[in-house]
Amino acid sequence: MAVLGASSFTYAEATWTQTLPDWIGSHVRIFRFFDGVPRLIVPDNLKSGVNHASFYDPEINRSYGMMASDYGVGQQARDPGVSHGWEFSRFRPDTLSWGNTEKNAAE
């Protein structure tokens, strides 16, 4: 899920995993969907994007950082002490009635 801060314009897609290839691929599709890139992305502290979450010195995953650099986007890890105020339930594969491709096409 990606949300543009000023407009709350939202993009959402389902992936099978949260591994680095899926994480980077999702960002590429996000940029295509928005037909451009923001100046700054602030990812959650997902291990695929952020190796070490820290308020003062976060460590961005090297491949994720290179992808952002290729697109000319700055990245800043989210402060680990700040909550979104949203709660998400854990994904349960047994409740999935269609594949990710069909789910993404329906959105």
Image (spheres, helix red, strand yellow):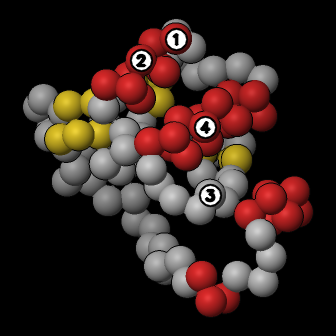
Query: What is the spatial separation of the Cα atoms under label 2 and label 4, in whole angstroms?
Result: 13 Å
Say few, some or many: other residues with alpha carbon within 10 Å of mark 2 (under 14 / 14 to 19 / 20 or more). Answer: few
> What residue appears at the point 41 percent right and 29 percent down from the top-left corner?
64
Q: Which circle marks residue 66 in the picture?
A: 2
Q: Which circle marks residue 15 in the picture?
A: 3
Work out whether mark 2 precedes mark 3 in sequence or the reverse, and give the earlier one: 3
Q: Residue 39 at x, y = what percent?
A: 52, 17
**Looking at numbered disc 1 in the image, what kind of residue is underneath it?**
Asp
Q: Under tag 4, what secondary structure?
A: helix
Q: Residue 105 at x, y = what percent?
A: 87, 57
Q: Residue 88 at x, y = what percent?
A: 48, 73
Query: What is the spatial separation of the Cα atoms under label 1 and label 3, in whole angstroms?
Result: 23 Å
Q: As displayed, is residue 100 above or below residue 97?
A: above
Q: Residue 86 at x, y = what percent?
A: 46, 68
Assess whether mark 3 and mark 4 are in contact (beta carbons under 8 angstroms).
Answer: yes
Q: Classify residue 94 as left or right of residue 47.
A: right
Say few, some or many: other residues with alpha carbon within 10 Å of mark 1 (under 14 / 14 to 19 / 20 or more). Answer: few
Answer whether residue 104 is visible to the viewer in this image.
yes
Assess whether mark 2 and mark 1 are in contact (beta carbons under 8 angstroms).
Answer: yes
Q: Which residue is mark 1?
A: 70
Query: What is the spatial separation of the Cα atoms under label 4 and label 1, in whole angstroms?
Result: 14 Å
